[in-house]
Image (spheres, grey):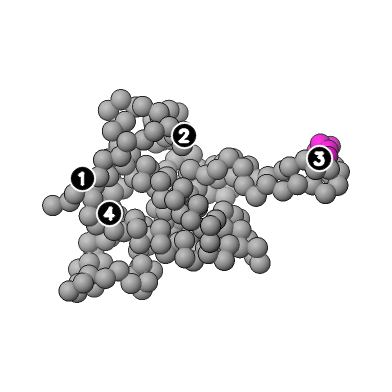
Amino acid sequence: MELAVVILSIKLYSALVNLSLRPNIYEELLAEQQMLIDKYSSATNAITMDVIDQMVLLDAYLKESIRYSPTSTLMPRACVRDIVLSNGVTIKKNQYVGVNIHAYNRTAEAYGTKPSTFDYKRHIRLGTTLLHSEADAAIWGIGTAACPSKLYTIYTMKLIMALVIRNFRVKHKSLLGNHGYVNTNPLNDSIFYDIKSKHELVFQIRN
C-alpha cells in the first residue's frame, strides 16, 4: 500500500502540471465530466465506480501523463552473477540494471506516430487503458508481480482528478515566464519539465 500511495501522489502531481499547461485538454475533460453529471444527476451527484469506468477521456489522459512523465529508470534489479549481453557488454555480479522507461515511452513502435508529442487520445486509438497490464503499463509490474494496489490507485487517481476538473480550473503561473520548463520542440508540443522544480499551480473555482 505504501508504494501505491507514492505512485498516486507523484502521478497526480504530474497529471496536474500537465493539465495546467494544456487548457484545451482541460476543456475536453470538463465536457466529459459535464456529460456524466447530466447523465447521472442526483441529489448527491455521487461519483461511483460505474461512473468512473465511463471516464474514457480522463483514463486516456492519465495514461498519457504517466507515459509522458515517467521516472528515468524502472524496476532496478541486482545481478546475482556476471551476465554477458548479446552486444558484448558484461554486467558484473552485484551491479544494478533497470528499464529505461523514459526512452521506451518515446518509441514509435510502442506508441505510434509522434511519440514525443503529448497526445492522450493515442491510447483510445490503441485500445489501451490504465488497467492494461502489458509492457506499456510496467509501472504497475507485470503478471504475478503486478502491484496488488493497482486497482485502488487507478480508481483513486481518477476520482481525485474528476473532482478537481469539476470544481476548479488548473493554471500554471510559469506559462508567463517559462520558469523551470524547456520547450524542446514547440511545433509538436514536446514540453518537458524538471520534477524537482517548483511549479506554482493556480486552482480557480469554477462558476
Q: Locate residue 51, reporting x and y percent.
A: 33, 70
How dense is the environment of label 3, judged by Cα within 10 Å: few (below 14), some, or many (20 and up)?
some
Quadrant assignment, res 47:
bottom left
- Tell me the residue that label 3 is attached to: 91
Mark 2 to mark 4 CA distance (whole Å): 25 Å
Q: What span is colored magenta in the figure?
A: 87-92
Residues 32 and 122: in front is 32
**Is residue 60 within the magenta segment?**
no
Q: In the image, what residue type sits under mark 3? A: Ile
Q: Is residue 22 visible?
A: no
Decide: marks 2, 4 in contact (CB < 8 A)? no
- Tell me the residue that label 1 is attached to: 204
Quadrant assignment, res 39:
bottom left
Residue at (53% x, 64% y) in the render? 149
Q: In the image, what residue type sits under mark 2? A: Lys
Decide: marks 2, 3 in contact (CB < 8 A)? no
Instruction: From the image, state whether disc 2 or disc 3 is nearer to you.
Output: 2
Mark 1 to mark 3 CA distance (whole Å): 51 Å
Q: Earlier in the sequence, mark 2 or mark 4?
A: 4
How dense is the environment of label 1, judged by Cα within 10 Å: few (below 14), some, or many (20 and up)?
few
Element on which disc 1 rests: strand
Mark 3 to mark 4 CA distance (whole Å): 47 Å
Residue at (21% x, 72% y) in the render? 44
Element on which disc 2 rests: loop
- Tell me the residue that label 4 is attached to: 165
